[in-house]
Image (cartoon, rainbow, N blue to C red):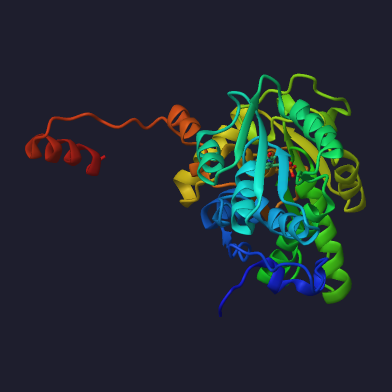
Amino acid sequence: MRWDGLLKSYKEFLPITENTPLLSLNEGNTPLIKLERLSEEWGVELYVKTEGTNPTGSFKDRGMVMAVAKAKEEGSTTVICASTGNTSAAAAAYAARAGMKCIVVIPEGKIAMGKLAQAVMYGAEVISIEGNFDQALQMVRNISEKESVTLVNSVNPYRLEGQKTAAFEVCDQLNGAPDILAIPVGNAGNISAYWKGFKEYHQVKNSGLPRMHGFEAEGAAAIVHNRVFENPETIATAIRIGNPASWHLASAAVKESQGKMDEVSDDEILAAYRKLASTEGVFAEPASCASLAGVFKQLQTGGIEPGSKIVAVLTGNGLKDPNTAIDCSPIKAILLPNDEKVVAEHIKGVVHV
Ligand code: F0G
């Protein structure tokens, strides 16, 4: 069956009027993949929602299609956002699609290469500040109040409206909600959006409610420690955020669902990142793997029961951040002469191991 994107597919659940342009890059409808090997190894029923298959390679497309469509409907000509990279890629793409301008403010040196490539290709005005995401967000919030630009960070409520559709898909794909929804947490919008989505779908379809397990990076774990991190640090640059904007919504989601907010170290994130790709063939960016790292951690510490049905959200595509992949992989290309005999000899050694 033809898929026409989120605004057409979930019209009745979204704030769409007859004047809302049905903007689309055919976002949504992403796979839910069962991790057969890890399920067996860890004694659970484990699935991943591969949001990296969205048009710009992350879950941000779900929220951005809605936010940019509403900005266009309201007569705005320019959108603005702060970003650790994925929001800016999605904003720039949907702005281009809608014939609008896009301004992005990013932390200098702390966004993955693929994301920067996207912002420039989609034609955004890219401003790189010598500051972190939290400072960039404060800046664009202030500027959007004074200038005629529309803020499309997740403090724009239309973003969460679009992002909640992922929960609908999970329920349809599994024929009901899982026991646990594991998700990375940065600015805390996505966990809040999923919870909203599960609740709304349950009301209409009786699909059930999961426990929400959110995972922050240890060096940026504001919600876990209940304090702002002034200088957040993690290899997972997408979630290098010390003062999440949707902090209270995320805490409410965890509390209402009887879930947990927890933290994972960079080493745990990288171990999950490599394991996911090398044992299951799924390549997700480091921040995404905080969800999987968290599941592994909580299976060991008793935070998740053996046998649980778990969906881990993989928020972004592995290709977004090629540098981290190459730097952290134990595999290096083997340099050999341009000589078939030498190559054949080498392969024999590999095959017979
Ligand atoms: N995973 C990825 C790949 C992300 O890019 C982000 C957020 C998150 C998880 C966390 O989601 O903020 O809703 O809790 N990236 C934002 C950005 C901040 O600018 O692209 P959240």
Q: Which of these two is toward me, 86 or 207?
A: 86
* Residue in the image at 69% along x and 30% along y: 240
The front one of 63 and 179 is: 63
> Can residue 2 be seen in the rendering of this structure?
yes
Rendering coords of residue 202 (x, y %):
85, 69
Q: In the drawing, does residue 331 fall left or right of residue 252?
A: left
Which quarter of the image is occupied by the C terminus? top left
Residue 44 x/y as whole percent:
65, 55
x%, y% of residue 204? 86, 75
Above or below, comparing residue 76 to residue 231 in the picture: below
243 up-or-down from 167: above or below = above
Q: Nearer the viewer, residue 7 or 180?
A: 7
Foreground of the two, 60 or 34 = 60
Q: Residue at x 84, y 38 (%)?
A: 245
Judged from the image, the quadrant occupied by ligand 1 is top right
Q: Is residue 221 visible?
A: no
Where residue 14 appears, as percent x and y from the top left, is 80, 67
Considering every residue shown, the one lying at the far bottom of the view is 1
Q: Is 21 situated above or below 236?
A: below
Task: Look at the picture and state if 339 lies above or below 162.
Answer: above
Residue at (59, 65) in percent of width and height: 26
Q: How many marks?
A: 0
Residue plotted at (50% across, 50% down): 282
Q: Quadrant of residue 168?
A: bottom right
Which corner quadrant holds the N terminus? bottom right
